[in-house]
Image (cartoon, rainbow, N blue to C red):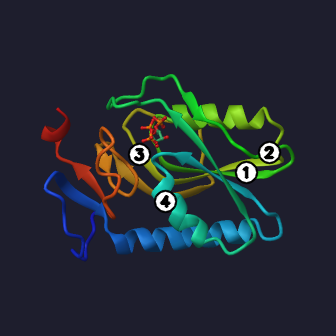
Amino acid sequence: MDCQDGVTACHEDIERVLLCEADILGIVERMGAEITEDYRGQNPLCIAILRGAVVFFADLIRAIECPMEIDFMAVSSYGSAARSSGVVRILKDLDTPIEGRDIVIVEDILDTGITLNYLIKNLESRGPRSVEIAAFLVKDVPGQRSAVRPRYVGAHVPDAFIVGYGLDYAERYRNLPYLGILKPEVYS
Ligand code: PRP
């Protein structure tokens, strides 16, 4: 997919804009409406997975119109590397007990699925009533098929190094208001 309207000014390290701000707004509003519809009368607990999901989370919760609560977890499997280490570490756990609660895990991207697979198992062991996933992006990698199935998906993106709207390379570019593909020479 490409941003067609050209309104997003592109950072010099970005090869191509995938989703401009208007695209992102439309996606977030659609996902918020889906969650609102599904959780009416249930008071779900939406959990942001720091740090990448923070920008999406801030927008998504304002697009949800039913009562809800929020909490945060910080996990890391990538560190500053371009590839997942395969080992997920909890850097910050929830403050909220989740037994009997309806949980929506909010993630910026599903890539290998290692992070969400770990999180689902970890949270399900605490006895919630339900656990669903809202993933802003799902990366389509040839030959890679994750067992994780998010109930809410923003967009599918190609197998490239994607930054902006919360996603980083070596902690940079999270503040870009759009989503773009990083130029290979920046990370190779
Ligand atoms: C990123 C992203 C997801 C995870 C997805 O987190 O935010 O949590 O990778 O990749 P996976 O499906 O291959 O597990 P990262 O560890 O880079 O930390 P961050 O959120 O602080 O950027």
Instruction: Look at discs 1 and 3 and give the one toward the viewer.
Output: 1
Disc 2 marks which residue? 98
Camera-nearest residue between 63 and 74: 74
Q: Residue at x 67, y 37 (%)?
A: 120
Work out whether mark 2 precedes mark 1 in sequence or the reverse, and give the earlier one: 2
Give the alpha-carbon distance from disc 4 to disc 2, as whole Å: 22 Å
Q: Which mark is residue 27?
A: none
Q: Can the viewer see residue 117?
A: no
Camera-nearest residue between 117 and 142: 117
Q: Which mark is residue 103?
A: 1
- Element at label 1: strand
Camera-nearest residue between 115 and 54: 54
Question: Would the CB of label 3 be found within 8 Å of ligand 1?
Answer: yes
Give the alpha-carbon distance from disc 4 to disc 3, as whole Å: 16 Å
Give the alpha-carbon distance from disc 3 to disc 2, as whole Å: 29 Å
C-beta proximity under 8 Å, tags 2 and 1: yes
Disc 3 marks which residue? 139
User: Is disc 4 surrounded by few (<14), some (14 to 19) or many (20+) residues within 10 Å?
Assistant: many
Q: Residue at x 49, y 59 (%)?
A: 56
Q: Amino acid at mark 4?
A: Phe
Q: Residue at x 51, y 68 (%)?
A: 28
Disc 4 marks which residue? 56
Q: Is residue 157 left or right of residue 100?
A: left
Q: Position of residue 30 (x, y in %)?
A: 55, 72
Q: Up-down: is 119 above or below 65?
A: above
User: Is disc 2 surrounded by few (<14), some (14 to 19) or many (20+) residues within 10 Å?
Assistant: some
Q: Amino acid at mark 1?
A: Ile
Q: Residue at x 78, y 32 (%)?
A: 125
Quarter of the rendering containing residue 188: top left
Q: Amino acid at mark 3?
A: Lys
C-beta proximity under 8 Å, tags 4 and 3: no
